[in-house]
Image (spheres, rainbow, N blue to C red):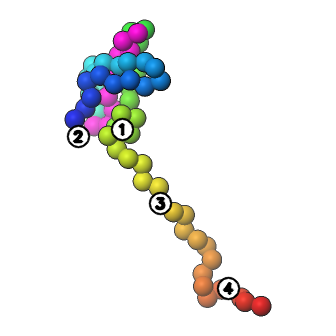
Amino acid sequence: MKIPKIFSKNNHEYIFVKQVNKDMFLYKDMLYGYNECFTRFDLGMVKEIVKPPKTEVKPERVIFL
């Protein structure tokens, strides 16, 4: 997926400056001029995968009364 050159978040528009490392990107706020780093997840390039928790109860240990 391509890196967005301009994107908005929290009513601020950011313009791409440079890639810091493999997963971090530096953007400049167009309104105030300060720099901020975003990850691929922040930019919407990667979806969060939530794994269900493992249960500690084993079927062998369940006692039915």
What residue did someone put label 4 on?
62
Left or right, 29 with reference to 16: right
Measure how far apart labels 4 and 1 are at the Cα level: 43 Å
Measure how far apart labels 3 and 2 are at the Cα level: 24 Å
Is 29 contained in the magenta span? yes
Checking the image for residue 1, the label placed there is 2
What residue did someone put label 1 on?
44
Could you tell me if the residues under marks 4 and 1 are in contact, i.e. CB atoms within 8 Å?
Answer: no
Disc 2 crowd, CA 10 A, few/some/many (<14, 14-19, 20+): few
Identify which amino acid the numbered label 2 is placed on: Met
- The disc, 2 or 4, on the residue closer to the chain's N-terminal end is 2
- Magenta extent: 22-31
Determine the residue positioned at 38% across, 18% down. 13
Question: From the viewer's perspective, is residue 64 above or below residue 16?
Answer: below
Identify which amino acid the numbered label 4 is placed on: Val
Disc 3 crowd, CA 10 A, few/some/many (<14, 14-19, 20+): few
Point out the residue furthest to the left here.
Answer: 2
Residue 60: image x %, image y %?
A: 61, 88
Depth check, mark 2 against mark 4: the one in front is 2
Residue nearest the viewer, comparing 49 with 18: 49
- The disc, 4 or 1, on the residue closer to the chain's N-terminal end is 1
- Please tell me whether mark 4 sits on a helix, a strand or a loop: loop
Whether residue 13 can be seen here: yes
- The disc, 3 or 1, on the residue closer to the chain's N-terminal end is 1
Checking the image for residue 51, the label placed there is 3
